[in-house]
């Protein structure tokens, strides 16, 4: 296939949801999660609050060091075991792949106009939570912080307080495992009643931050929580969230689909697809999805490059051939190259059933080409 000359179109990465929701004075904010760019706050009716600890309020560096030591050191047992000390050293030295955090913006006013508001928000929150858990399984906790904040906001917005508590407990766990005074993260409140897992994690945090120490110590002794290793074991044992297990690339692709297809926000989807490609560079489907995303953003040159890369990885990718043919036909008006791509798509379709495009669609485009020629 010859080298193509593409049209350059400006790449637009403007925020997909920019309109802010008006504040309602008769309600309060329980989860005020602030990021760069426009973002709606989630408003809920007042609930019983059990904890709040803002790292920003620590007055001195000594206070911060003390807090960090109290979190990372054992609570009941006098010393960490040798194996636990080595694990912490490895975790501290290990290079994490930190993606450039996507500035996720959800306009609840816009989503509320859709008939599937509740189911859509629930699906989004679940996918965010699944992605955060996938990071946790990789022992990479930092990227999950923003995801868990937003997932918790949505659960609270829906009044699903049991799921909200589980999300907050995961957020506390991630903050403990990736703790740094520089993070300056405010831990959201939790609501009654708490499940066992949330109770354990909340009381670990309260004890480590010198809050309600007597009560928390009794609860930690009850569950034999003496250090971080015990905490992680208990978090796994008492987990009743039923969060689906997915590997990290699949979780990234799932949430990227959510923003690209459901919310019409390719700008938010792009970052997740690109990270998935870094983790799974031989996945031709990710190149397909990136091609579709860049097409939506108006960058035809990158669109073509990703379709060609997908074909180089998997010559049986009828979807990449078909979408590349569409670019030649509709954007470049190179009908000869488009016809070649559609024929290759048909041939690839005969060799594999793993395809989104159908033979009928390909033949329809071939008929269109013949008319235009």
Image (tube, rainbow, N blue to C red):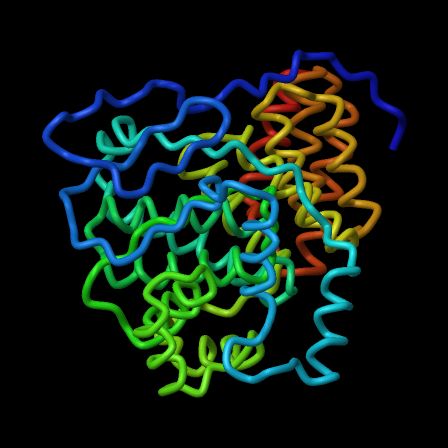
Q: Position of residue 101 (x, y in %)?
A: 59, 38
Q: In the rendered view, does 210 fall on the left or right side of 372? A: left
Q: Residue at x 79, y 60 (%)?
A: 93
On the rendered image, what quadrant is the N terminus found in? Answer: top right
When the figure is inspected, residue 73 is found, relative to residue 322, above or below; the finding is below
Q: Nearer the viewer, residue 135 or 257?
A: 135
Q: Residue at x 26, y 23 (%)?
A: 21
When the figure is inspected, residue 281 is found, relative to residue 243, above or below; the finding is above
When the figure is inspected, residue 334 is found, relative to residue 326, above or below; the finding is above
Q: Residue at x 34, y 51 (%)?
A: 52
Residue at the right extreme, as displayed: 2
Q: Position of residue 90 (x, y in %)?
A: 77, 68
Q: Residue at x 79, y 37 (%)?
A: 308
Q: In the rendered view, does 179 fall on the left or right side of 260? A: right
Q: Position of residue 81 (x, y in %)?
A: 69, 85
Residue 346 makes an appearance in the image? no
């Amino acid at each position: 296939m010859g080298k193509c000359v593409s049209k350059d179109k400006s790449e637009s990465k403007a925020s997909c949801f920019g309109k802010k929701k008006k504040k309602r004075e008769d309600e309060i904010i329980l989860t005020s999660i602030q990021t760069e760019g426009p973002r709606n706050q989630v408003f809920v009716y007042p609930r019983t609050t059990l904890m709040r600890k803002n790292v920003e309020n620590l007055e001195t560096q000594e206070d911060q060091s003390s807090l960090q030591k109290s979190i990372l050191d054992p609570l009941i047992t006098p010393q960490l075991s040798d194996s636990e000390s080595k694990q912490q050293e490895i975790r501290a030295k290990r290079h994490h792949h930190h993606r450039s955090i996507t500035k996720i913006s959800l306009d609840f006013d816009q989503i509320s106009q859709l008939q599937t508001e509740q189911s859509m928000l629930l699906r989004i929150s679940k996918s965010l939570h699944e992605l955060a858990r996938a990071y946790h399984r990789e022992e990479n906790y930092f990227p999950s912080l923003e995801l868990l904040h937003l997932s918790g906001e949505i659960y609270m917005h829906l009044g699903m307080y049991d799921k909200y508590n589980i999300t907050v407990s995961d957020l506390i766990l991630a903050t403990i495992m990736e703790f740094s005074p520089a993070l300056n993260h405010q831990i959201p409140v939790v609501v009654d009643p708490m499940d066992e897992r949330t109770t354990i994690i909340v009381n670990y945090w309260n004890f480590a931050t010198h809050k309600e120490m007597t009560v928390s110590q009794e609860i930690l002794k009850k569950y034999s929580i003496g250090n971080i290793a015990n905490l992680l074991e208990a978090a796994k044992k008492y987990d009743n969230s039923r969060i689906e297990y997915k590997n990290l690339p699949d979780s990234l692709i799932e949430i990227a689909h959510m923003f690209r297809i459901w919310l019409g926000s390719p700008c938010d989807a792009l970052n997740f697809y690109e990270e998935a490609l870094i983790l799974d560079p031989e996945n031709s489907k990710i190149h397909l999805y990136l091609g579709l995303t860049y097409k939506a953003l108006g960058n035809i040159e990158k669109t073509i490059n990703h379709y060609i890369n997908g074909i180089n990885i998997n010559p049986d990718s009828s979807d990449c051939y078909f979408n590349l043919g569409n670019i030649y036909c509709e954007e470049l008006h190179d009908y000869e190259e488009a016809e070649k791509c559609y024929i290759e798509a048909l041939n690839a379709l005969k060799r594999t059933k793993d395809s989104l495009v159908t033979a009928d669609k390909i033949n329809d485009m071939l008929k269109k080409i013949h008319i235009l020629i």
